[in-house]
Image: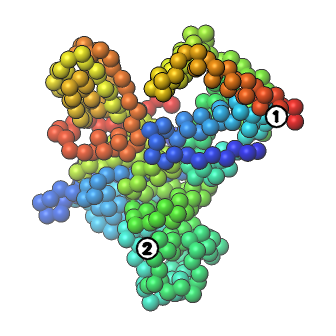
């Protein structure tokens, strides 16, 4: 299990949300495999030096979102299949929000739409390859 | 309040008021600290935090109201109850002529339940050795020694008055780790005051905010952050003056923008912001520190209390 990350202490993002973001990224990038067990709440809390309730809260939200699943008495795992727990509207809303952030950045850095598209496609392929390579292992 | 049925709070402060002469230091505070929580006690200097702590520990009598620890009135605290409390006063005082080891022996003689393993573990954590002279320690090392002396009797209730004062980042981290280590046992409670809000955010279950002797908030860190909101209203021309409503902490006006920091936002308040007809209203996330500064900074009327009865 390689779930190593550090928290930004004086961030405007609450700690539990930082933990959520890191776990999501770890799953997408394949650092956490599908079906892999996560560290116990207390273990991760001690590693990050945060209140265990904060970690528990992050786990709970991720379980609710379908990324993690809890097997009673054993622990918390990355879900085997990514369930889509969001409604169509909510999916769309979240995607629109993410794209908006991307586009602000692109505009500030003065990229054209075709350029943005090229970046998107290249990054998409890189991620896919990383993922398939990891899953094969 | 009935948060934990059956479990009585470890600390129970009821309408506590304290005067020094004619000066009111603590004004009608009521607060319950449930067993097993880490409670951060916040407020600017001179706002009555230390006085409140000294009263519930029985070092000073309240002028009015009561404070109970383990259900016992602080004015008549028996020694057996004191032995269950670990108190780390502000400033990390030690007897300078003793060695680290002698400090341990001295303290141990007062506590039947002294745990030498814990004492030594904390010392190691702060890189202290038994032969060091207490008077020659650095500030961080002295804090480490005091913490070891406070933790070794395995107190049920740990009261730390500004334990991080003057510590470097490494020592601060060790302090937080020690605090989390203590609360591995579910029945251990920590009540600590601090000015380091990022530390508080890491470890505290809940916070109590004292301002000018008045309790201004009693809630989780998350609620505190969520209840204090910052909005930037953009306009096509000169923005109108900030509307006056209860809960407005700060307002700031530039050519085209009106920035407002608001506590306890209600739909009504949101409507009033809409009514100003801005081009856009953008909510901005605040750090705990920003939120805290807005909340206890200079402002006129202090008419609102942030309550902790948040929905789970």
- Picture residue at 29% right of the left edge, 32% below the top: B261
Q: Residue furthest top?
A: A88
Judge whether residue A90 can be spotted in this image: no
Judge whether residue A55 can be spotted in this image: yes
What number is the disc on residue B139? 2
* A73 left or right, relative to B290: right
Closer to the eye: label 2 or 1: 1
Classify mark 1: helix, strand or loop: helix
Point out residue B166 in the picture as x, y percentages from the top left corner: 40, 66
User: Circle 1 marks a residue in which chain?
Assistant: A
Task: Classify B92 as above or below A101.
Answer: below
Q: Which residue is mark 1?
A: A134
Classify mark 2: helix, strand or loop: helix
Instruction: Rate crowding at label 2 as few (under 14), some (14 to 19) or many (20 or more) other CA atoms within 10 Å.
Output: some
Point out residue B43 in the picture as x, y percentages from the top left corner: 31, 52
Q: Between B300 and A20, which is closer to the camera in this rendering?
A: A20
- Picture residue at 33% right of the left edge, 68% below the top: B59
- Picture residue at 29% right of the left edge, 54% below the top: B44
Task: Classify B151 as above or below B39.
Answer: below
| Display colour scheme | rainbow
Kindly indicate the quadrant of the structure image that contains residue A58: top right
- Picture residue at 35% right of the left edge, 60% below the top: B53
Kindly indicate the quadrant of the structure image that contains residue A77: top right
User: Circle 2 marks a residue in which chain?
Assistant: B
Q: CA distance from mark 2 to mark 1?
A: 49 Å
């Amino acid at each position: 299990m390689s779930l190593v990350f550090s928290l930004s202490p004086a961030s405007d993002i609450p700690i539990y949300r930082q933990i959520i973001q890191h776990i999501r990224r770890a799953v997408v990038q394949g650092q956490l495999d599908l079906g892999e067990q996560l560290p116990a709440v207390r273990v991760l809390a001690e590693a990050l030096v945060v209140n265990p309730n904060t970690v528990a809260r992050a786990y709970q939200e991720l379980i609710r979102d379908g990324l993690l699943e809890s097997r009673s008495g054993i622990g918390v795992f990355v879900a085997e299949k990514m369930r889509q727990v969001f409604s169509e509207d909510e999916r769309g809303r979240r995607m629109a929000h993410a794209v908006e952030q991307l586009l602000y950045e692109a505009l500030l850095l003065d990229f054209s739409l075709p350029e943005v598209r090229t970046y998107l496609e290249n990054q998409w392929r890189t991620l896919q390859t990383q993922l398939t390579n990891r899953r094969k292992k | 309040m009935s948060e934990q049925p059956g479990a009585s709070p470890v600390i129970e402060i009821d309408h506590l008021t304290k005067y020094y002469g004619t000066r009111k230091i603590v004004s009608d505070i009521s607060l319950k600290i449930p067993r097993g929580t880490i409670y951060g006690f916040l407020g600017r200097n001179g706002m009555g935090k230390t006085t409140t702590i000294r009263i519930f520990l029985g070092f000073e009598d309240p002028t009015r109201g009561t404070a109970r620890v383990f259900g016992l009135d602080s004015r008549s605290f028996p020694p057996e109850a004191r032995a269950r409390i670990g108190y780390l006063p502000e400033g990390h005082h030690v007897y300078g002529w003793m060695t680290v080891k002698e400090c341990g022996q001295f303290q141990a003689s007062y506590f039947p339940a002294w745990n030498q393993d814990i004492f030594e573990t904390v010392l190691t954590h702060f890189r202290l050795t038994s032969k060091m002279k207490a008077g020659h320690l650095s500030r961080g090392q002295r804090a480490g020694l005091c913490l070891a002396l406070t933790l070794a009797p395995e107190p049920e209730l740990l009261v730390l008055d500004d334990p991080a004062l003057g510590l470097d980042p490494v020592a601060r981290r060790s302090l937080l780790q020690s605090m989390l280590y203590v609360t591995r046992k579910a029945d251990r409670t920590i009540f600590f005051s601090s000015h380091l809000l990022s530390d508080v955010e890491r470890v505290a279950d809940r916070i109590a905010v004292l301002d000018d002797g008045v309790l201004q908030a009693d809630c989780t860190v998350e609620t505190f952050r969520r209840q204090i909101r910052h909005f930037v209203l953009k306009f096509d021309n000169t923005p109108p003056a900030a509307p006056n409503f209860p809960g407005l902490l700060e307002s700031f006006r530039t050519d085209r923008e009106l920035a407002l920091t608001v506590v306890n936002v209600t739909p009504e308040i949101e409507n009033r912001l809409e009514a100003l007809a801005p081009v856009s209203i953008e909510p901005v996330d605040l750090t705990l520190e920003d939120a805290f500064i807005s909340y206890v900074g200079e402002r006129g009327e202090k008419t609102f209390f942030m309550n902790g009865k948040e929905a789970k």
